[in-house]
Image (spheres, rainbow, N blue to C red):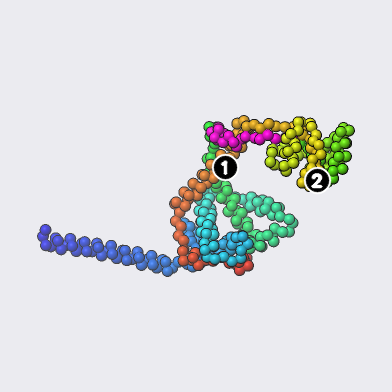
Amino acid sequence: MPLDFARTLWYAMGVRLRRVIFLALTLVACSQQQAHKQDPNVISTVNGEVIPRADFELELGREAQAMEGVATHTPEQIEPYKQTLLSTMTERILLLQAARAAQVTVTPEEVDRHVLAQASEYPAGTFDEALSQTHTTRSELMRKTKDKLIIEKLFQDQVFSRVAVTEDQIRRYFDEHTDEFAEPEKVHALQIYVKGLDEAKKIQQLLAQGKKFQDLARRYSLSPDAKVGGDLGFFPRGEKPPVFDETVFKLAPNAVSDVVLGDYGFHLFKVLEKKPARKRELSEARAAIEQKLVEQLRAERQREFVASLRAKADVKVNLAALQTVTSRPMGALPQEL
């Protein structure tokens, strides 16, 4: 190899090596600068969208308040809650981003209806008090309700609408879960319950004279079912106190028991009807099986959908900021305006 060519090649290799070294040093320097520039008020970014530290601490404080009534927590106790909360908030942002991309929206009227429905579950005048206990403002509630409805509609449009169960799947489930469709023996009975033996004997005599069991139950029985003539409906063994099972399952339909001593007083029973143990037919169980399988498939597809969003997402966690977050009593949390 001529000397001039070798020198030229060596020089070119040297220039290339110096460029590689310079590029590597530049990347390290940029990475270090980026680490130094991380905002302590940002917990993470999800495809460029920020999870503010203030929002994270507020939600963590609410979680801490619900942790078995304990006001303060060690870092070891609170760490799993931090990780779970970060995952939940990240998924919420990913789903809302997917909803925006799919142009999924809800109307203000839909949001209002759901908020009013929530408020109706509380006694008059106590809904705002319940919100204040968790440091939740009306505006925040409206925003969270809107996000929740949008995510539900996203799942309905993008995931659940593609879930279907076949007849073969329904039949296979029925054949593989026979115990689930086995119905035990049941009895339909009436009762009269009173405190004293003398009163129970008096009622027994009235029954012997031809008085109707239901009428006497309404007049004399102290049990809550007295208002419906002592009707206990159908029930299997083990659902009622032992004295019920020991008596009614031995009686024939339309037979009346003798006076029976219970835990708190005396009973008279009448059996109206008995149903023997049996296995439900597929035609009877089909609707329930289909609903169960659809719910299972929806949950599975929902997990897959969220996992696919996570796999494609650019999530950057500010570990330094996350590590310094600790739980605080709700009273120390900032109030939203």
Q: In the depicted view, which residue is nearer to us: 97 or 39?
A: 39
Residue 107 spot, x, y in % from top left? 61, 50
Which amino acid, by three-letter code, is at mark 2?
A: Gly
Q: Which mark is residue 295?
A: 1
Mark with earlier residue (1, 2): 2
Residue lying at 14% horizontally and 61% vertically, measured from the top left: 6
Which amino acid, by three-letter code, is at mark 1?
A: Glu
Classify mark 2: helix, strand or loop: loop
Q: Nearer the viewer, mark 1 or mark 2?
A: 2
Range of residues picked out in magenta = 171-188
Residue lying at 83% horizontally and 46% vertically, measured from the top left: 195
Callout 1: few (<14), some (14-19), or many (20+) C-alpha neighbours within 10 Å? some
Residue lying at 87% horizontally and 36% vertically, measured from the top left: 205
Instruction: Work out how far the residue at label 1 is from the one at label 2, CA to CA, in angstroms.
Output: 46 Å
Q: Left or right: 19 with respect to 312?
A: left
Callout 2: few (<14), some (14-19), or many (20+) C-alpha neighbours within 10 Å? some
Residue 150 lies within the magenta run:
no
Q: In the depicted view, which residue is nearer to us: 186 or 29?
A: 186
In the rendered image, is residue 233 in sight? Answer: no
Q: Quadrant of the C terminus?
A: bottom right
In the rendered image, is residue 307 in sight? Answer: yes
Q: Quadrant of the N terminus?
A: bottom left
Residue hosting label 2: 265
Residue 169 to residue 333: above or below: above
Residue 186 lies within the magenta run:
yes
Residue 263 spot, x, y in % from top left? 77, 46
Q: How many marks?
A: 2
Residue 157 spot, x, y in % from top left? 55, 44
Classify mark 1: helix, strand or loop: helix
Residue 147 spot, x, y in % from top left? 58, 53
Q: Which mark is residue 206?
A: none
Q: Left or right: 308 with respect to 147?
A: left
